Amino acid sequence: MAKILVPIKRVVDYETKVRIHADGNKISEDGVKWIVNPFDEIAVEEAIRLKEQKGDVEVVVASIGPDGTSEQLRTALAMGADRAIHVNTDAYIDSDAAHRILAEIYLRDSFQLVIMGKQAIDSDASQTGQLLAARLGLPQATFASKLVIDDSFATATVVREVDGGLETLRIKLPAVVTTDLRLNQPRYPSLPGIVKAKKKPLDVIELSGLGIDTAPKVRIVSMQPPAPRKAGVKVGSVAELLDKLSNEAKVI
Amino acid sequence: MSRVILAYIENNGVEVPKGSLSTIQAALLLKKAHNYSGLVGLLLGGDGTEEAAKKVAAFGLDEVLYVKNNLLKTYLATNYALAFKKVLETLAPTVVLALADTRGRDLMPRISQHLDAGQASDVIEFVDGGRFKRPMYAGNVLATVEITTARKVVTVRQSAFDVAKSGASECPIRELSIDISADSGMEFLSFDTVKSARPQLVEADRIVSGGVSLKSKENFEKYIVALADVLGAAVGASRAAVDAEYAPNDWQVGQTGKIVAPKLYIAVGISGAIQHIAGMKSSKTIVAINKDPEAPIFDVADYGLVADLYQAVPELISVLTASKS
């Protein structure tokens, strides 16, 4: 049986207006809605599709975060993942710490593929997948928009969205693949899926018990809102709009 | 101990893309602002790399190193990381700097992992020796971050830095011969330059985006795509329009899609959800066309037209078409 590891991150919902906490170096979590990082959701979807195509595949989702993180793991289970691992911690986890923890999870089992989002929509660092591949000495294919895996899970052909075009690579498995938008459109969990998810295994591991150094290598010193845009004007007609664009903004 | 910056400079054969000149400019700024003792440029590639190295010799770098190897002819993360690590055996830079384009984003974490160094991605400003400004939450937050390790890896956002100007005296150029093994588990198969009459979203000077008010895929084609075509613009869409399947996922502009900053961004029938605004608010000129005068998109628009898109867009298309011919 082939096993796929899908690391997912709990992030603030993209429909939430982020507010900077009074401490000035983090986001206020009051009344915030949490979701699965949308790029990771694409990764979960892709792993489930591989399972549906090939049959004998186990999809394991893993996440690092506080108690509530189990909710995002349940969402992934409801979509169709088989089991979940929750590394429980309240600590601030940067990309470096995250990849060390994920490497430990990877090494406890035998996975043929790691697939995860190309970046999280909070930190926007785009590092964890590549760090993980490097630590484990694995090939990587980032920003994947198409993924084809042979039946023996020995190689993958990956189309990558890179500057100026699409690059096609063949990589040996096991490997780390990170997902871009075009790869798929994630499904919504079905009602039977949600019911089934409640019975699927979700292991909670305390981070402190893993003995991994997770001191951040990149610390957030302060946060500020970006400079606001200057208030614009309303125009009364298409003709006026075109006049402004051509003579004032000089963009057409 | 000398404090040296190593800047990774991309080349495609003999070509040195414009982004590489922004890399050099950012590295020069960092060196000057924080008194680094040296700035070394590094090029990795196959044939043509020596010529490319010569091209960047007069931009103010202290030395240019290059590695020419057939296994580096096409970019592969594993081979490039291997060559990079060998270079780092002979040189111990304090900072490794590269561009935050798809190659830099792909490659640099492998270098950070090797150096056990913290990495700040997508840096737009150098605050002091170890502190950097970078956007988070799709630009909704500007963070100052500190890399706590002695050695640091930084990728820089191209649009935040000018291109370096040549004119300095030529610095020494040195070839490093490096052996790397052939089997890295990765194989390059092909590269397709995306052939489209329309420009790519992230590179476009003009973008026309449509929202859920378009009501159907057919309308999206008839109004948004048609307006984009007459303007020579790329086509974007709100997440709601993508979720409703009026537009494909890779047209999505926003925090969960593409972050864009064209000269002209026209939002049609888009209310202005937070996640959409996060993806386009850095555009130079923003136009909003929406029949709801209270729509939040008008808060970020330079020019707002409160109108029914089904009347305004055909009128725009017909005037623009007439003025073109």
Image (cartoon, coloured by chain):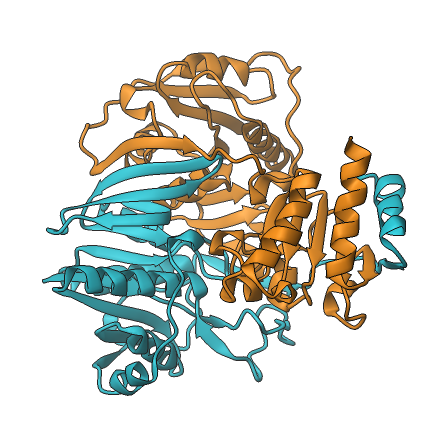
Chain colours: A cyan, B orange
Q: In the visual, does B185 lie left or right of B311?
A: left
Tell me which corner region of the image, top left, top right, bottom left or bottom right, holds residue A65: bottom left
Q: What residue appears at the point 24 percent right and 39 percent down from the top-left corner?
A: A170
| Nearer to me, A34 or A166 | A166
Numbered label tally: 0
Q: In the visual, does B307 lie left or right of A95?
A: right
| Nearer to me, A162 or B38 | A162
Q: What residue appears at the point 46 percent right and 44 percent down from the top-left corner?
A: B153
Tell me which corner region of the image, top left, top right, bottom left or bottom right, holds residue B65: top left
Q: Quadrant of the C terminus of chain A?
A: top right
* Percent position of residue A29, x then y: 55, 79
Q: Quadrant of the N terminus of chain A?
A: bottom left
* Percent position of residue B78, x then y: 28, 37
* Percent position of residue A165, x then y: 45, 36
* Percent position of residue B81, x then y: 32, 36
Q: What residue appears at the point 49 percent right and 52 percent down from the top-left corner?
A: B250
| Nearer to me, A196 or B63 | A196
Q: What residue appears at the point 51 percent right and 61 percent down from the top-left corner?
A: B256
Q: Is residue A203 visible?
A: yes
Q: Is residue B237 visible?
A: no
| Nearer to me, B307 or B243 | B307
Tell me which corner region of the image, top left, top right, bottom left or bottom right, holds residue B294: bottom right
Say above or below: B131 vs A248.
Answer: below
Say above or below: B129 vs A9.
Answer: above
Say above or below: B201 vs B281.
Answer: above
